[in-house]
Image: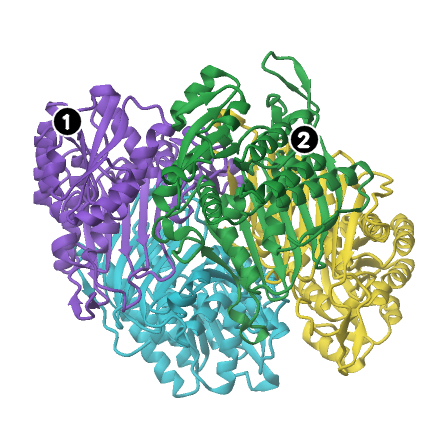
Chain colours: A purple, B cyan, C yellow, D green
């Protein structure tokens, strides 16, 4: 591991599309705003096409390139492997990297199946005994508003949780002529809206509530079964376009979830609402710097001034915010990745296990699998193995 | 029937609590703002307690009182019976009234069971052959914003419907010490949040979409099982506190529903969103004078100016609004009942069958029953007999 | 006065257009929801055109009509004269009515000039010594959210007021072809947006703050100078289309006001924001059931949960609301008039002077006149005689 | 100039506080997301305190430091001087840099007086003849929503502009115990809220409307006259805490402005609304990824679907956005500076004059001065020399 040498942390990244762009920005920026024990250094970028990978490396600031992910994992310059590829490759790369003693940051969903995810957890658990760390990139935990909401829940500000409702609505497939893509193939993506969007709201709500889903009843749907490829031919969509499910948390709360890419007009509406016995919180990623909070603890006596308050989560006392700008000067999507990197680097340096762990990723995977099984069995209630707390 | 004599329509009302107050206001006000073929006259108010019924009659403006609903039905002054009692009495009163040749306006849900609702539909169908009309009081169809949304859907402005999501959130039971009430007893209310709130969103979405639900998968929950009565003793809550269900419409749209009285901070959040292939609409009763509408029909070419627009549904061209105030001068909850009465009186006068009909009420009842059955059977998918279009 | 006989209050109304419709609804409805010491009775409706006045009387429920306002004032059936005519007639009718011992409710603005308003105040002051009451119809004081905001200010919840900003935005003149109307003639209306809309926000802010404006600097503008009449000819617009002014309150707060009918898309956006040393409040009539309130009293220590809260002013503990519906069931524009009538009838019965008084109306008139003088003198600061507290 | 050598642009920055942090992030990031003709290189950071400047240089990524701004200007490594100091030093540094053939990016307001600004414009004009470019950092022009709003106005989508209303509300001085700072000293900052916040809304509205203010009437106020310094002693606040002014644009539009740091609860509410004859736009920086747009061009015929639409300005077709993330993935405050740098670098490379120019900065300065003169003269209307179009 190179993190010891010169206080730098050599980063090898596999994949350089959307996630590669945002992850590399995070690696470049984290130490500019936060005090980090090690300075990330963009060492090697891995991609299959040499020309495009070189272009991306120049753009993102990587020192070198590789056309095989194994080179990235093997490189002496690399202390951490950042996996930004489609889900079908996560397990193989992550397990190899951990075996090679490299810390791993892995994009979500953790894997395309529970079996793969379990292998990854086993590898991560073993690696941790050697001081090798791993994290799954559920970046929404690092939205300041969500991290702050978690703090409110943890402090008991909303009391016992009774209701969770979460949706993740996009609309980029709403047009029936939108082209075929790897995200629409089950063999690459594992599932459709469920794994892409549903995974985020499952992780975010389990994190927020501090509890795990114990069962679900689900409906999935594919609205458009064939889409044009680059060549103009039609290809089969083999994943869900939308997934809806009801659930129960271990503590007794009831929950409702929906993930879709067909909600015309909703661009990135990742919304969560939690109602407790003393208060409620609500969040919408399309207004990601805000948290709605209803303080119902005062009861009827002074309830006449109660109302959902719009908290601009931009105060220096809010999670992560102190490193940035004055109140009311908004943060954006990419900051969530910067925060993720900050926490990961700090965990590596102080020898602690960062969250969300691969085990957290497995917990999400189990929910996704239960959703698919329930949908296949006429929405029948499907229990989820939790095996521990959130 | 007295509607012929002097152009008046004698109204007999049974029940004088919350619904009695708002219905009588509607009967008093309708002809002050709308041109009606007959002027409603508040003839007889029925209630079991003479003193309280007399007080209510004075307050509401009824000419006389009765302590047995049979007197109301039998009165020569009564051409229409308005049923504002708990659900367990609807069938008996409505069927008797229709048999007596009295038009009927019946509060929702239509009945406490599908069997009762079917009997009511049979009675209504037979009565219609005699020119006797019946209507179930799903007043939310008469919110101008919802009526206008229906118009947009009907005109094809949002294309093929793909997603329906509806919640009805209140919080008046959130406090565990809130007292016992008839709405919490299965024998009186039939069900809890399901029949009280869920019925509204089932009817509203079936109306909006112009289609019927063909099946559901459901979860229900009771958070607080015992509540204090007037005497301080604890009594059993025998209904659901919350009902969540997924569904499919006949045309293929997927849907999600939730009704609860435990969503702390939400006072009357009856919310509906519909996503179609060309546009979307969204509504929240807490902002009942507004409709959100996304016009996605222009496609990517001029999509850069697309966005959910907040339509203030207060223009004279909007449904019902021309009878009231200038643009931006809001209407309230009670107006929906006035509009209901206007449409009912006009239907009676011109010999047409008003909507929502008892058959519409039965369609809702079948959904509610399917929800309960699904919840009892581990959320298993439960088909709904539709037997005709919406 | 007839209020003594049989507990009724005979109402004579002059004018039957928009204001006549909403006032008569208030008179009809007040005792149906509130306990009143006297029941209003719609006795005589005055209007110049017999046919149209008879039609209006039938619609509104008046017992008789008159084609001269003097008949209304003189009628033995009339204990209270409700003046719903354009501003140029207010002084004459009100003074005559008060002289005749009739209580007066007068639409706003109180008059078309300070001189007239002063005469009216003198008449009202003298009449009060005889037990004859008068009120000017600034109905926005009776919006529950504004009445509640006043309560918060009065209780010191926002501390010392530093900033007041108020706009009243409409758009019905935005179209250059919109027809000529009496509201566009200085001789009838006194002024344009200033008297029609500006008067409301001057009264509402003086009421809310509990303080008076001591000076203003103003700009007025007429965007469209000629408009078509019924005959198609062009006629001169002789009033302002928009009035903007800055001001200072006696306590030192600075203020900004704008009234216009050219704010395209704004239908009835009467908006007020007040920032104090401990909190802030904000209101928009287009969401009239809501109040925004920022509680800044906790200071930095727990400021991380601070935010403008959206209070749904629909709780039974909120002003006027207990008489109506459950929480979250909205009220509309017309309710403000019902509340006005309730307070007026109660004041008459218990022998107190209702507010806003004619003196309050004069205070507004003085501000309006100062605005016009400042605009005429190059926006020069123009002091306002206050002569007493709000 | 070093921009020729190796395609790099050596940046020398003077000042390293808030503005230094955000500018250096922009210089580091611009070429990572945009195709730039030259790659910015952080060459020299100037600051008076060596230790603190070294620390800042390490944090921000500067290659070297200087304790005298003259060294920055003189450095051969520096092709562009970025001025991030208080306003009293802008003129001297900028004029020296331009004389030395260095491009200049200067923070706003351009200067502390019109006289200084005029000298700067003269220097910039002369420098431009030598290919040396200058820009004033009104970054809000590069908020995608504002740039897009400008496009709508330019395309005639809102027709003739009639109303402009702009506020810039913060609350960080609301606490009377908030400490003394350089921004509260007239000799350093020139003015208070006026120059700090008012400058932004003057520039933004002149840019949006494409027109210049021709006169103003103003009120300024200082709420708290003494504040504690580091030593605990009280020092005099010599600037305005709030500035309010009315104005007229050359085309006849009327306008209202307010800048304050005492609007408790408003953190960075830079709000602009423009009403035209065909449409309206509204913006609030606290929701900086959104633009409200009302399309009134369809007229009454299909006006029933009109409403302010909330455009999420996150589509690839929106200004600057294509370089970043997918729709609905928000941008933040700092992006506006990155966009500024992108446009500046491109202008330097292609030999065009970037906007906002020093002349634009002077135009703002003239408005600020007129505001102060009007406030000093009892709000008297004060004409503004425009000398050309926006």
Q: Which residue is mark 1?
A: A132
* Protein chain holding label 1: A
Task: Report helix, strand or loop for mark 1.
Answer: loop
Q: Quadrant of residue C276?
A: top right
* Label at residue D13: none
Residue B88 seen anywhere in this rendered image of the structure: no
Q: Nearer the viewer, residue B122 or D194?
A: D194
- The residue shown at (89%, 54%) is C120
Same chain for marks 2 and 1? no
Q: Nearer the viewer, mark 2 or mark 1?
A: 2
Q: Relative to D37, is C233 above or below? A: below
Label 2 CA crowd tier, 10 Å (few <14, some 14–19, many 20+): many
Label 2 element class: loop
Note whether C382 is above or below B156 in the view shown.
above
Residue C257's x, y, as percent?
71, 49
Q: CA distance from mark 2 to mark 1?
A: 56 Å
Instruction: Provide residue A215's location: percent of width, then percent of height.
Output: 18, 47
Q: Is residue C234 visible?
A: yes
Q: Label 2, on which residue?
A: D190
Could you tell whether C17 is left or right of D319 in the image?
right
Query: How far across and down, in percent of the image, does residue C383 sit?
Result: 85, 42
Quadrant location of the C terminus of chain B in the rendered image: bottom left
| Residue count near mark 1 (Cα–Cα under 10 Å), binned few <14, some 14–19, many ≥20 | many
Q: Is residue B316 left or right of residue A360?
A: right
Question: Could you say which is closer to the camera, residue D332 or residue C173?
Answer: D332
- Residue nearest the viewer, comparing C275 with A19: A19
Say above or below: B13 vs B246.
below
């Amino acid at each position: 591991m190179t993190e010891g040498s010169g206080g730098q942390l050599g980063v090898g990244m596999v994949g350089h599309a959307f996630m590669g762009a945002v992850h590399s920005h995070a690696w470049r920026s984290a130490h500019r705003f936060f005090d980090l024990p090690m300075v990330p250094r963009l060492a090697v970028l891995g991609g299959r096409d040499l020309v495009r990978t070189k272009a991306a490396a120049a753009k993102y600031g990587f020192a070198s390139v590789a056309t095989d992910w194994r080179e990235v994992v093997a490189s002496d310059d690399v202390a951490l492997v950042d996996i930004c590829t489609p889900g079908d490759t996560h397990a193989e790369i992550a397990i190899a990297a951990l075996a090679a003693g490299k810390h791993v940051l892995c994009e979500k969903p953790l894997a395309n199946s529970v079996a793969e995810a379990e292998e990854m957890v086993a590898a991560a658990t073993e690696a941790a005994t050697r001081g090798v760390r791993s994290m799954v990139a559920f970046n929404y935990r690092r939205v300041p508003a969500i991290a702050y909401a978690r703090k409110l829940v943890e402090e008991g500000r909303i009391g016992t949780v009774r209701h969770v409702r979460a949706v993740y609505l996009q609309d980029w497939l709403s047009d029936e002529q939108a082209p075929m893509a790897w995200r629409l193939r089950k063999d690459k993506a594992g599932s459709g809206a469920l794994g892409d969007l549903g995974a985020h709201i499952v992780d975010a709500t389990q994190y927020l509530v501090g509890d795990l889903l114990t069962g679900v009843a689900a409906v999935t749907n594919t609205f458009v079964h064939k889409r044009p490829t680059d060549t103009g031919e039609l290809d089969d969509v083999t994943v869900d376009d939308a997934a809806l499910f009801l659930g129960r948390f271990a503590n007794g709360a009831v929950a409702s979830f929906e993930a879709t890419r067909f909600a015309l007009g909703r661009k990135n509406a990742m919304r969560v609402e939690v109602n407790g016995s003393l208060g409620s919180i609500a969040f919408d990623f399309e207004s990601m710097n805000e948290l709605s909070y209803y303080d119902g603890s005062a009861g009827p006596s002074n309830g006449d001034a109660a109302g959902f308050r719009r908290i601009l989560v931009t105060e220096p006392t809010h999670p992560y915010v102190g490193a940035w700008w004055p109140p009311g000067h908004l943060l954006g999507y990419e900051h969530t990745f910067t925060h993720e990197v900050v926490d990961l680097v700090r965990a590596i340096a102080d020898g602690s296990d960062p969250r969300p762990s691969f085990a957290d990723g497995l917990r999400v995977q189990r929910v996704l699998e239960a959703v698919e099984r329930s949908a296949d069995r006429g929405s029948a209630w499907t229990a989820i193995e939790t095996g521990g707390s959130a």
